[in-house]
Image (cartoon, coloured by chain):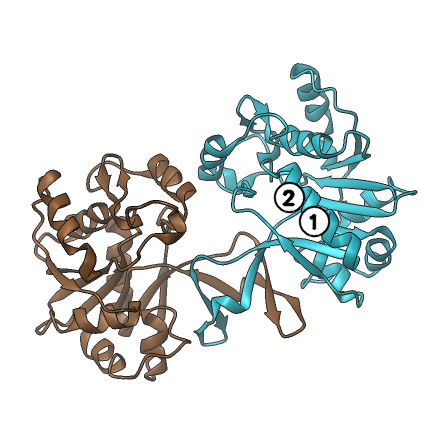
Chain colours: A brown, B cyan
Amino acid sequence: MKRSVIIVAGGSGQRMGAQMPKQFLLLAGMPVLMHAIRQFHCFDPGMPLVVALPPAHISTWTQLCAEHRFTIPHTVTAGGGTRFDSVKKALHALPGTDWIAVHDGVRPLVSPALIARCFETALKHGAAVPVIPLSNSLRMLEAGGNHSVLRENYCIVQTPQIFRARWLKNAYRAPCCPSFTDDASVVEAAGYKIALAEGSRENIKITEPVDLKIAELLVPGFCS
Amino acid sequence: MKRSVIIVAGGSGQRMGAQMPKQFLLLAGMPVLMHAIRQFHCFDPGMPLVVALPPAHISTWTQLCAEHRFTIPHTVTAGGGTRFDSVKKALHALPGTDWIAVHDGVRPLVSPALIARCFETALKHGAAVPVIPLSNSLRMLEAGGNHSVLRENYCIVQTPQIFRARWLKNAYRAPCCPSFTDDASVVEAAGYKIALAEGSRENIKITEPVDLKIAELLVPGFCS
């Protein structure tokens, strides 16, 4: 059983108000993306790691790896214009694998235990995503108004999202579509069912400057 | 135009793994609930403040107020068994008011600017809640499975939720119902429309121990 991971780091970081894309910002002295890579390497040091980066950021990344003496082996692929295109292109860098995890490069705090849970669920069901419950009320927006919905009927989706390689590759043959908000939605549109694994509140996504501060607070020791 | 606020602090804090209910835990040296009260007092020092507390916690609160020399005037009401009952009982403590804000006692970082925005929107439309966009994908749970939904069609609801007093009182005449997840859902069920104001990511709800750490990071100076 061969498993691989695609770490998607395609953002330009506009929302962060920083010049550096958010995946390159320092968290506990190391770029956010390196944390994400390291966690997968800790989970399974033999697992092929593909990092999808915007072409314009590849040289910066190479420099950062040298500066931080980052030696975890990984393949860099040039991302496309959208997340969908980036994953599609990265899939070509993974010809012989049975299971593919897709992870957000801006989720540096994913734990090896969470990755293990997602793989276990995926192995049973073919596709799995980590989810957490909503801790706030939810409203649905609609033309001309909005209405309350039961938050118990929804869950928040994180990454890594893990799929049988054949399912994921089949699914990514479709043209991109606005309803593709993550990889699970692409795979689901191809007719496959998605199983749910237990996510973690600590597995946050670095979206705004405050998230980086929160991550500093939560960042664990190596391989924890 | 008379405005009042009900601050609901009914939780027993079971999820926090602490003996103290979460509204009493210290944030920057002061119980969480005092922060919430202080922010409303900063917004409008003349506004009547009603704090709904579980009967079993009232003596602890009195002690905490003495210890922390907390002198912001407020009325304490004994909460009911559910949030719905607590608000319903607190409404009796506010006979002559035009507008009522209902706020979670475990949202200590609400800013006076956010309170002002919600009052402005409520004054225009009769009922307003602060909302923020979802930064993660969302799935809907259903019998036998789950499916992806477009997160752009949803928003996360915070407090204070502000209502024309007559609307809120009318709405709370209904019997409690499982779909009442917040005050807006109660008011909506009575046939009124809810307008949306811009919330704030900093206006977090203290639900788990990690939230208190995050709040420590975000806690602003007095009246900021």
Q: Quadrant of the N terminus of chain B?
A: top right
Camera-side residue of B45 and B143: B45
Query: Secondary structure under badge 2?
Result: helix
User: For the residue marked with disc 1, what is the amino acid?
Assistant: Cys
Q: Quadrant of residue A181?
A: bottom left
**In the rendering, at what x and y percent does residue B218 appear?**
49, 34
Camera-side residue of B79 and B100: B100
Q: Quadrant of the C terminus of chain B?
A: top right
Q: CA distance from mark 1 to mark 2?
A: 6 Å
Query: Secondary structure under badge 1?
Result: helix
Q: Quadrant of residue B194?
A: bottom right
**In the rendering, at what x and y percent does residue A74 appear?**
10, 56
Count the marks. 2
Q: Is residue A180 left or right of residue B223?
A: left
Asked whether the residues under marks 1 and 2 belong to the same chain, the reply is: yes
Local crowd size for mark 1, using a 10 Å CA cut-off: few (<14), some (14–19), many (≥20) = many
**In the rendering, at what x and y percent does residue A173 appear?**
24, 83
Q: Are marks 1 and 2 in contact (CB under 8 Å)?
A: yes
Residue A110 visible within the image: no
Q: Residue at x 30, y 69 (%)?
A: A82
Residue linked to disc 2: B114
Q: Is B91 above or below relative to A182?
A: above
Residue A150 visible within the image: yes
Kindly identify which numbered label has been placed on residue B118.
Answer: 1
Q: Residue at x 77, y 49 (%)?
A: B85
User: For the residue marked with disc 2, what is the amino acid?
Assistant: Leu
Q: Is B200 above or below relative to A175?
A: above
